[in-house]
Amino acid sequence: MNAQPNTPMTRDFVLAVEGLTVSFDGFKAVDNLSFYVDENEIRVIIGPNGAGKTTVLDLICGRTKATDGSIRFKDRELTTMKEHEIVRAGVGRKFQNPSIYEDLTVFENLEISYPKGRSVFGALMFRRDSAVKERVRNIAETIFLADHLDQRAEYLSHGQKQWLEIGMLLIQDPELLMLDEPVAGMSVSERRKTAELLNTIIKDRSVIVIEHDMKFVEDIAHKVTVLHQGKVLSEGSMAKVQADPKVIEVYLGH
Amino acid sequence: MTSDRTFFLARKDMLGIVLLAILLAVILPLALDGFRLQMVGKYLTYAFVALGLVLCWGHAGILSLGQGIFFGLGGYCMAMYLKLEASSIENTKIQSTPGIPDFMDWNQLTELPFFWRPFHSLGFTLLAIIAVPSLFAAIIGFAMFKRRVSGVYFSIITQAIASILTILIIGQQGYTGGINGITDLRTLQGWDIRTDAAKTILYFVCVGLLLASILLAYFVKSSKLGRILVAMRDKEDRVRFSGYDVANFKVFVFCLAAAVSAVGGAMFTLQVGFMSPSFVGTVPSIEMVIYCAVGGRLSLLGAVYGTLLVNAAKTSLSETFPELWLFGLGGLFIAVVLVFPNGLAGLYETYVSPRLGRFFGGRGKAAPAGTRAPAIAE
């Protein structure tokens, strides 16, 4: 037997979070958290408000610095890297509220997210060549915005803004995609279209989704992690989690 | 690329630049007498600063209240060279130490300080005019932006640095000429810069450099970097999480604004014939922000017109009612902020451009407040 049963690094996890802790003035928002995400896995994180879901994403993408623990992405330690380095390593993150550039057009929003010319000089010399235009157009079609390329992003509807931000991540082609409540505030039809969109974009990458909408979670999740007070309360398939009495008590029950 | 763009300029911008060039290089020299033209030349040196502020403040959202620092540094570099040329041994043989600038002699300095020596060389001076302010801006920029200091805190710190530099220049009289600045500048490589003919030539050099700076600014603005600046102003985190090191971009645009301002400072010294700490401190720095705001902080050409108009108003008002000018300037700033936040360029885009467009067959579509050239997906 393996001498260290607690370090399952023999398998190729895309993301390995181990002993992750962050405390804000003594309050542990995330407390000794460990979980592992497989290649091509869709992991949904659920949990009551204040469970630390968004904080976990903040920690992975470098927005918040961990107090303790490690986050390894394809065997690279993320906790010591800067935000832009983490992005360049292949981690994309969508924020809870649509975070897009309102003063720019849809085309320009996508173009800025295109992973080329990211240094100062590179950006100055960046040419909008046919490869860029082609890629932007492809992405725009995927996110249902092909007819809006020249429109200023501020005039898009809320749902379209959410799609645009998803498109801005897609164009970077990240290996790990993190989505924070991608269907929040969407109409029923937008929600259905988004589920369809997510199902097409999750191919060939790992995805972490935070979501409250249980119907939606059931549709997409391979595995569900339930967080409560910064700790893992339960983990496994949707059916297993839903049957867990602890989960029913703190979250699903009401 | 659509057909209405040549290289990096939209046709509308090209037309604007040509009109400005005709105004500055043909109409004003023909319409104004030598004295008035020299005044316009002086105002134009401030336009360099306003131009830098359009990129730095208007586009990137970094409000520097200390652009006088860079205007001054550029101006002082030029002044040091000219002063050394004016302080030749035969010109200064009545001093106790001949061959050093007069103010050093008055302050009992007996040899040229080490940092003055390279300014004997014109090549070094021209390089220093750009390099010294850019380096200083880079140091401030890295110290601030890497620590994510932004917004009003950054503005206050730049203002403090402008204050500190003024105090330093005034305090170190023997090295800097103190409150009087560096005066009595005469020749550039033997060419007398005080004659009317020289001043006219310098005016045209200034116009040429300003137009070159405008083209450079348009190039930056129309590049992807220009759009990243706008994106940063809007959603800094999103840019960061798209894989950009945001601080580097801020440092770049701050340095660019500093370098352009410094060229203006050097041209000021050449045309006006002196440089003093009164162009470094907080008051001139804020005045220059007002020029930019009046012209329209998003419009490169607007900044030039804003500078010219505010200064023309300043000159005529302070000639007639000297005590009223400062109230006028303050009132103007309040009016810009409250009534027309996008300045003259905004008024032009809202009221004049659509009408012109209709008049010329609807070609010039109104873009909201002159934010940017129309985008292209074709």
Image (cartoon, coloured by chain):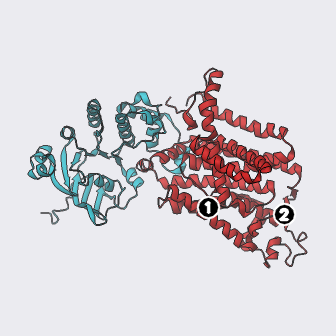
Chain colours: A cyan, B red
Q: Which quadrant of the figure has residue B3?
A: top right
Q: Which quadrant of the figure has residue A203?
A: top left
Residue B13 locus on image (x, y percent): 64, 35
Residue B30 locus on image (x, y percent): 84, 38
The residue beneath circle 1 is B135
Relative horizontal placement of residue A236, taking residue B69 as reference (left or right) = left
Q: Is residue B109 above or below residue A105?
A: below
The residue beneath circle 2 is B184
Q: Residue at x 52, y 61 (%)?
A: B144
Q: Is residue B291 above or below residue A147?
A: below
Relative horizontal placement of residue B320, taking residue A59 as reference (left or right) = right
**Which of the two residues, A75 or B48, is positioned nearer the viewer here?**
B48
Q: Is residue B359 visible?
A: yes
Residue B113 is labelled as none
Label 1 resides on the chain identified as B
Q: Amino acid at mark 1?
A: Leu
Residue A220 locus on image (x, y percent): 21, 39
Give how far apart the Cα atoms at labels 2 and 1 are. 28 Å
Q: Residue furthest top?
A: B361
**Which of the two residues, B111 or A38, is positioned nearer the viewer here?**
B111
Q: Is residue B51 visible?
A: no
